[in-house]
Image (spheres, rainbow, N blue to C red):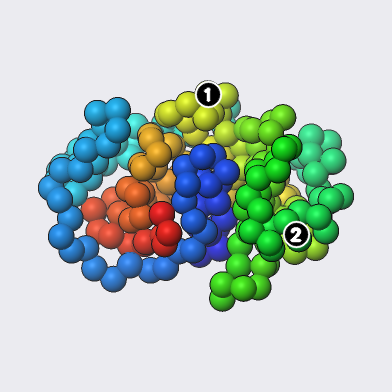
């Protein structure tokens, strides 16, 4: 569940305007047969056949996991690339800003993750001079995760890959639009299709919701 909470924050930082709270979904009710997205995209995951859904899953999987995909960075390579970010040297300021509800400064976009609504347990920083990378820290400023966006970010469609601080891949997401994303785990297993606040599995069963979408 934690990795989903973290991944939702990258959408906030990536101007998708989603919140970090996620809770299990119970039922799928009153879902329109066809939902039209901006840009003439149509969310038809609930209406197409299983063969068609499987084809979509394979299509985006092949784009996310190509021959250049790094599943595990060598420790020395990862630390060399992100050495300046392994510890947030400004963590006290970032922590207080996030705790006080600040989401943006002149140089950064910020996002916080809370336990039971009031205990800030981690936060994310996206520096405006490098919008393609998001850094996730624990409350003491220790790096936990990194999100790396594709070159065309923030223009849709774009992709992201998330890595642990040890350089191992966590997950990958294909962003179709503000409203719709396809999510995969590090082993290329399909996790689900997000539409707005709901996630559906490969069989079109609703499995998660995210609040304050």
Between 5 and 187, the one nearer to me in the picture: 5
Q: Secondary structure at mark 1?
A: loop
Is residue 104 among what the camera can see?
A: yes
Q: Residue furthest bottom?
A: 116
Between 115 and 87, the one nearer to me in the picture: 115
Q: Which mark is residue 95?
A: 2
Q: Quadrant of residue 44?
A: top left
Where does residue 25 sit, x and y in percent of width and height? 33, 67
The residue located at (34%, 36%) in the rendering is 58
Where does residue 116 sit, x and y in percent of width and height? 56, 76
Q: Is residue 151 left or right of residue 61?
A: right
Whether residues under marks 2 and 1 lie with C-beta atoms below 8 angstroms apart, the answer is: no
What crowding class fits label 2: few (fewer than 14 Cα within 10 Å), some (14-19), or many (20 or more)?
many
The residue located at (63%, 50%) in the rendering is 103
The residue located at (84%, 41%) in the rendering is 84
- Relative to 201, is 72 above or below? above
Tell me the quadrant of the picture where the C terminus can be found.
Answer: bottom left
């Amino acid at each position: 569940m934690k990795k989903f909470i973290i991944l939702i924050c990258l959408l906030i930082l990536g101007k998708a305007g989603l919140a970090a709270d996620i809770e299990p979904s119970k039922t799928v009710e009153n879902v329109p047969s066809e939902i039209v997205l901006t840009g003439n995209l149509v969310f038809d995951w609930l209406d197409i056949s299983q063969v068609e859904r499987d084809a979509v899953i394979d299509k985006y999987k092949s784009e996310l996991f190509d021959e250049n995909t790094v599943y595990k960075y060598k420790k020395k390579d990862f630390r060399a690339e992100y050495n300046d970010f392994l510890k947030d040297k400004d963590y006290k300021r970032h922590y207080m800003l996030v705790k006080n509800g600040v989401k943006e400064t002149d140089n950064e976009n910020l996002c916080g993750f809370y336990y039971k609504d009031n205990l800030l347990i981690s936060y994310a920083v996206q520096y405006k001079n490098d919008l393609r990378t998001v850094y996730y820290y624990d409350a003491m400023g220790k790096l936990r995760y990194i999100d790396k966006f594709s070159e065309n970010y923030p223009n849709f469609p774009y992709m992201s890959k998330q890595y642990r601080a040890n350089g191992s891949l966590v997950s990958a997401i294909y962003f179709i639009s503000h409203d719709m994303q396809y999510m995969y785990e590090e082993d290329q297993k399909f996790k689900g299709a997000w539409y707005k606040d709901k996630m559906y599995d490969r069989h079109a069963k609703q499995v998660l919701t995210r609040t304050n979408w």
